[in-house]
Amino acid sequence: MEHPENSEEYKGLTVNAGIEQPSIVNPYLKLRKKPKRREFTVDEYVQGIVQGNMTVLSQAVTLVESTKPEHQAIAQEVIEKCLPYAGNSVRIGISGVPGAGKSTSIDVFGLHVLEKGGKLAVLAIDPSSERTKGSILGDKTRMEKLSVHPKAFIRPSPSAGSLGGVARKTRETIILCEAAGFDKIFVETVGVGQSETAVHSMVDFFLLIQLAGTGDELQGIKRGIMEMADGIVINKADGNNIEKAQLAASHFRNALHLFPTPDSGWTPKVFTYSGFYGLGIKEIWDMIDEYFVFVKTNGYFEYRRNEQAKYWMYESINEHLRDSFYNNPTIETMLAAKERDVLNGQVTSFVAAKHLLDTYYQLLK
Ligand code: GDP
């Protein structure tokens, strides 16, 4: 290489040519190929799941969560074939704001229900998981004891984008878990509103975790969420917080009295407990057991599941129609232009929508 420093002008300064840099990759390193995960056939998936094989179950759930059409096709077949083995479980939704103590509580609730035998799956619905790159709900590290329990299966929220998509995947995962012999299903969600409705549409019992505040805790919680609850539990009733928690419980009891009796005929109960110290756990679960006896006797259990099945049929139709419309290449290109026209006031929203839909229907012909 030419070194200008070696020219006559710069007497007294010489620069050697230098040596070539060695490769940054160790030449002796043998690149080991990552073992390719074996692809199962639909029947192998179903067989593995029904036999309770956790590895196969996990892989099947990954397929359910995948957005690839070829994965979805297999997943749907697997779900279909698992359906006859599913349904035999109690499904419990657990909701609360961040910090309410969901993971601490699920850890102790989980151990409590597993004492009587059976298997528990903890799933989650967190529509923000795509934005935050991974859900913190249903995260194994947050449930120390359950995560090492051989009879527990913990799966964080799928990050499918829309709440509807996330919820559908969780609902499908419930079917796979049940087929794998999980007779207790917890579905965790953050207490922020819409995700509760989604969870409510797939569980038999909805448990709301609350904290004692300054006496006005009822203000922050939406009436709609309270109306969905089959049980409200006030966490962190320990130390010098016990009295506050009991006061909060009586506020909730009073508020619930003002609501009409739910369709189930079950009056929601309010308890205080401490997830951290494991206090009051038995009382909560005795109440939940009592609920199941109650609704199985009066037929509401069956009714609610049927209603949910109906709801999910319509949800699926809606989702498919929406996807088919918005993913249509012609519509995709037209949308931006139409949006501009609407913003410029050149056409009304309704005319633009009609034009787009008419085009879509024409394309279907
Ligand atoms: P999550 O965000 O709802 O899952 O809440 P966590 O389970 O992570 O709990 C949030 C914080 O509250 C943690 O620091 C817990 O240790 C604490 N915590 C949870 N349950 C209790 C309880 O029963 N009593 C007390 N004092 N603290 C608790």
Image (spheres, helix red, strand yellow):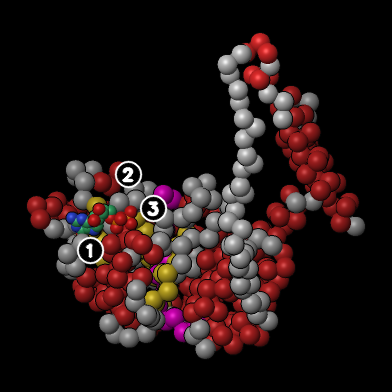
**Residue type, mark 2 in image:** Gly
In the rendered view, does 194 fall on the left or right side of 84? left
- The segment highlighted magenta reads 180-193
Where does the image place residue 18, in percent across and percent down from the top left? 62, 35
Q: Earlier in the sequence, mark 3 or mark 1?
A: 3
Indicate yes or no: mark 1 CB to ligand 1 under 8 Å.
yes
Q: Earlier in the sequence, mark 2 or mark 1?
A: 2
In the rendered view, does 287 fall on the left or right side of 203? left
Indicate yes or no: mark 2 CB to ligand 1 under 8 Å.
no
Q: Which residue is mark 1?
A: 275
Residue 190 covered by magenta stretch: yes
Is residue 140 positioned above or below 159 on the image?
Answer: below
Q: Residue furthest top?
A: 9
How far apart marks 2 and 1 lie (CA) works out to: 22 Å
**Residue 22 or 126: which is nearer the viewer?**
22
**Residue type, mark 1 in image:** Gly
For the N terminus, the quadrant is top right
In the rendered view, does 185 fall on the left or right side of 336? left
Where does the image place residue 47, in percent across and percent down from the top left? 59, 88
Residue 298, visible in the rendered structure: no
| Identity of the residue drawn at 37% across and 85% down | 118
Considering the numbered disc 3 on the image, is that residue within a helix, a strand or a loop? loop
Q: Which residue is mark 2?
A: 220
**Residue 348 or 339: which is nearer the viewer?**
339
